[in-house]
Image (cartoon, rainbow, N blue to C red):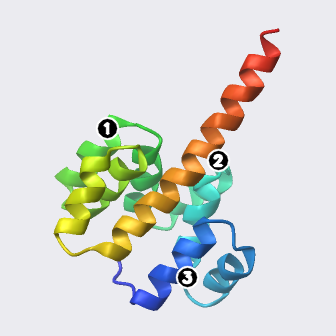
Amino acid sequence: MKEYSPKIIIAWAEAISGNHKLASWLKSNGYAELAAFIAALNLEESARIWLMKEGYPELMALVRGAEGDSKAFTWLRDNEFRKLALIAEGADNDDEAVKQLLMEGHREWAMISLKIRAVKNDIQAEHDDWHSLSQR
């Protein structure tokens, strides 16, 4: 995975949380993969395809891991993306993974993990609400 400055990581975190101006800025300023990640996290299939086609399988694995796909965690570790595996696990509600990131001094990545978790959990709650309404 590319190295990102702390400023870009913070912008990405805010864009994950719904700041559309920052997401657009990322896309227009050489960080299209981070903008595509946000769209993929929000279930946009075209963004998921773009990440794979453009050579960012680690970001797609991060999305899949956040969604609870255990194969994604394994793939990340097998391909030497240990930090991303921890971020994905934290995003999938594993508090120990977030603690591990913090213990290793990766506060910014723990923040990303928690931002992804919030979005993923909101999507799941909306899905669960819709599903329970459709069952009535």
Quarter holding the C terminus? Answer: top right
Going by the image, does 2 lie left or right of 16? left
Residue that mark 2 sits on? 43
Tell me which residue sits at (47%, 90%) in the image: 7
Amino acid type of the residue that numbered disc 1 sits on in the rendered structure? Lys
Residue 94 at what x, y percent from top left? 33, 44
Which mark is first along the chain, 2 or 1? 2
Residue 92 at what x, y percent from top left? 41, 44
Amino acid type of the residue that numbered disc 3 sits on in the rendered structure? Ala
Above or below, comparing residue 68 to residue 12 in the picture = above
Label 3 SS: helix
Tell me which residue sits at (55%, 53%) in the image: 118
Above or below, comparing residue 115 to residue 78 in the picture = below
The reply to whether the C-beta atoms of the residues labelled 3 and 1 are less than 8 Å apart is no
Image quarter of residue 1:
bottom left
Residue that mark 1 sits on? 71
Label 1 SS: helix
C-alpha span from label 3 to label 1: 29 Å
